[in-house]
Image: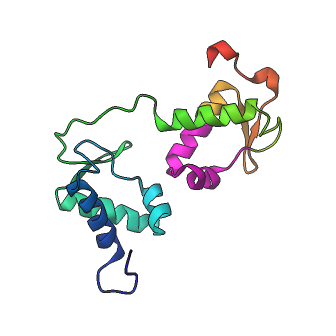
Amino acid sequence: MLDRDGPVPIYKQVADLIREQIERGELKAGDPVPSEAMLERDYEIARTTARRVARELREQGMAYTIQGEGTFVGPPSSPRAARKVPLYQKIAEEIAERIRQGEFAPNRAIPGEKAMMSEYGIAKVTARQVVALLREQGWVFTVAYRGTFVSDPSEWPDEDTK
């Protein structure tokens, strides 16, 4: 439980909770530290506070960050398990399936960046990667200042090219 009115800054409290997970072995060397979006959602903190959590863990020598990939437990020399399929691809597959199932109809909007960030606990850049992949595959099209919409079914990829 975070003490939001106490003398210890929130970012230090969250960093301490993650450090405790590392010390208990719940997070091992090479494991990803929860993303900024997950920290925001789970602890109800601002993005800047979540960034300070990662910085605090780095300063304590508990974690390291790789630009564009995330923050990981341990020193930079720690081997980390590669994701089999990048997260944005998994989310794009799920949204494509929802389109296929009719949850999102042709010429109707798919969830926007903020909705994806909230639903999947991802960063804005990841939400943009999801949309870019769906657009590249033909599932959706984007209209500037209006949103991203489901393409006509004739534009969808063939089942064997997914």
123 and 28: which one is in front? 28
Q: In the image, is 133 to the left or to the right of 55? A: right
Q: Position of residue 152 (x, y in %)?
A: 82, 28
Q: Position of residue 53 (x, y in %)?
A: 32, 64
Q: In the image, is 160 to the left or to the right of 48? A: right
Query: Mostly what secondary structure, the magenta segment?
Result: helix
- Against 3, residue 77 (above or below) is above
Q: Position of residue 3 (x, y in %)?
A: 37, 81
* Display colour scheme: rainbow
**Which residue is situated farthest in the top direction here?**
160
Q: Quadrant of residue 13?
A: bottom left
- Against 1, residue 71 (above or below) is above
Highlighted magenta segment, given as a residue range: 110-132
**What residue is shown at x 46% (from left), y 29% (from top)?**
85
3 and 144: which one is in front? 3
**What residue is shown at x 25% (from left), y 64% (from top)?**
56
**What residue is shown at x 76% (from left), y 40% (from top)?**
149
Q: Quadrant of residue 118?
A: bottom right
Number of marks in the image?
0
The C terminus - image quarter: top right
Q: Is residue 15 shown in magenta?
A: no
Q: Is residue 119 shown in magenta?
A: yes
Q: Position of residue 135 (x, y in %)?
A: 66, 32
**What residue is shown at x 24% (from left), y 54% (from top)?**
22
The N terminus - image quarter: bottom left
